[in-house]
Image (cartoon, rainbow, N blue to C red):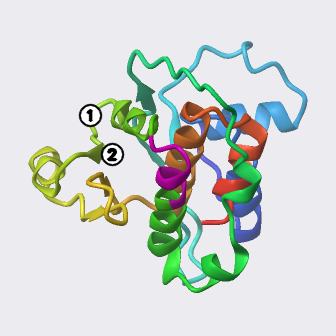
């Protein structure tokens, strides 16, 4: 595998084109360039790390993909996910963590009967959601768990913004949202 340096603008463009959790930077670029994604033996998916505020080149860090464990969501009435984002309230949130928690809380209110499905979304060796702070800390001492509103569900918040977007997108899709709309909503983080 070869490594390349990319500037911040290019990094953000590539990261914004992620269509599914676990999609590698190579797969994204192959898709954007019209090359066959199946042509290359897949390597471990990578997550493009957040660029620093300095003008240093962006480092690409290998991580494990998010896995969804045996989940089947039965939705009686399709939710209107376009109503999820309230731009004014979203703009009042503090940083990416605040926006992430806000959108998860809105999803919880909108999908009360099925929200527990989030507990099945996890990394290969990483727990993203739990029913208690202690459960997340037991899985990872650096998880920085935060409760999603007053729902009784907790989420790990020490992921970079790109990973938070990927997690939110997966949550949206698990709750019945179209993949393209899920990606657009997740970009609001």
Judge whether residue 48 can be spotted in this image.
Answer: no
Give the main secondary structure, helix, strand or loop, of the magenta stretch: helix
Tell me the mark number nearer the camera, choosing from 1 and 2: 2
Residue plotted at (75% across, 21% down):
37
Query: Along the horizontal axis of the image, is 42 left or right of 125?
Result: right
Per the image, the residue denoted by label 1 is 125
Per the image, the residue denoted by label 2 is 128
Residue bounds of the magenta highlight: 106-112
Give me the C-alpha separation between circle 1 and circle 2.
10 Å
Check residue 58 for magenta coloring.
Answer: no
| Residue 174 in the image, given as x and y percentages of width and height | 54, 32
Pick the front one: 105 or 179: 105
Q: Is residue 84 above or below residue 56?
A: above
Pick the front one: 110 or 144: 110
Q: Quadrant of residue 22?
A: top right
Quick one: quadrant of the C terminus?
Answer: bottom right
Q: Quadrant of residue 31?
A: top right
């Amino acid at each position: 595998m070869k490594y390349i340096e990319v500037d911040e603008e290019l990094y953000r463009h590539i990261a914004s084109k992620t269509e599914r959790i676990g999609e590698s930077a190579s797969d994204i670029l192959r898709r954007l360039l019209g090359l066959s994604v199946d042509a290359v033996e897949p390597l471990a998916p990578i997550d493009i790390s957040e660029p620093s505020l300095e003008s240093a080149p962006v480092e690409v860090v290998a991580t494990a993909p998010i896995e969804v464990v045996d989940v089947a969501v039965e939705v009686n009435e399709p939710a209107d996910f376009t109503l999820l984002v309230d731009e004014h309230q979203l703009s009042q949130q503090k940083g990416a963590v605040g926006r992430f928690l806000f959108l998860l809380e809105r999803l919880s209110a909108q999908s009360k009967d099925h929200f527990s499905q989030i507990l099945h979304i996890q990394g290969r060796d990483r727990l993203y959601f739990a029913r208690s702070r202690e459960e997340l800390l037991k899985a990872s001492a650096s998880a920085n768990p935060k409760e999603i509103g007053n729902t009784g569900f907790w989420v790990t918040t020490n992921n970079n913004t790109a990973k938070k977007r990927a997690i939110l997108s997966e949550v949206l899709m698990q709750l019945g949202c179209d993949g393209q709309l899920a990606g657009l909503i997740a970009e609001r983080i």
